[in-house]
Image: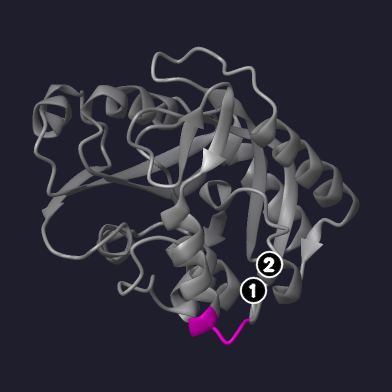
Amino acid sequence: MPHEVSVIIPTRNRAKFLKAAIESVLSQRDCLIELIVVDHESTDNTADVLRSLPKPAKFVTAHISGGIGPSRPKNIGADLATKEFITFFDSDDIMADEALAGAISVMLERKSHAVFSRIVGTIDKDGMPIHETSSSRYFEAKYRRNRLNTRLSSEEVANNELQGYATLVYRKEAFNVTGRFDESLEQAEDFDFAYRFSRKHSIEFADVPYLLYRVHDSNLSVHRRGNEVVSNLSTSRWHKQARAKLGLHG
């Protein structure tokens, strides 16, 4: 039986990448996808892109305003989701062909409440591989540690041992128990939610290729500096704010 998954894509002014992201989700094998695209005040031709796409049986769009970051569109999408599993996918990334089936198979095998998987690499705005060092070393180091320690405690989530929040797939029932994304955070809402989730539920690492991370001119969390991909200053600031709110130090 195919796995039934709600995939929520929050988007804002990502029209040039959105079609490829959606197509990569809809091409998932052994899954029945409920696709929910939440357009958060886009001023580009996002609406035209969505109208041009062939609609599968489960394709929902919502157009919303208000909120300071990704949390509100994620919450709206979660409210619309109806399937046993739920995940959130960035509208500028590319999902690997068997990402969801592989991740959910591991979740079922280990009886865990959520899994996260491997970020395969980084690509540029044209979809070409970025051959650089900083993020590559980061992902490789996380991968080695996650292979050795597959189940993360809340302390390990707090210490940033979870290598890719964008790869998290949750059981919807456990997701609902945790609550909602914090709409007071402009960024780091994924860290905040994952930490709160891990206080009550298990998170396992699935050694499954999951996504290609796209780096372009308007990423929220990173930017190019020469041949390097580095974090934006705002990302660190919001991460510190989220940690302070959770009572975490350092």
Residue 16 shown left or right of residue 215 in the figure:
left
Q: Position of residue 230 (x, y in %)?
A: 55, 39
Q: Earlier in the sequence, mark 2 or mark 1?
A: 2
126 lies above or below 209: above
Q: Residue at x 64, y 51 (%)?
A: 116
Amino acid type assigned to the residue bearing label 2 in the image: Val
| Residue bounds of the magenta highlight | 244-248
Check disc 2: other Cα within 10 Å, few if <14, some if 14-19, many if 20+: many
Q: Secondary structure at mark 2?
A: helix
Residue 149 shown left or right of residue 164 in the figure:
right
Q: Residue at x 25, y 23 (%)?
A: 16
In the rendered image, which residue does mark 2 sit on?
157
Which mark is drawn over residue 198?
A: 1
Q: Residue at x 48, y 80 (%)?
A: 177
10 lies above or below 77: above
Name the residue at the front extreme. 226
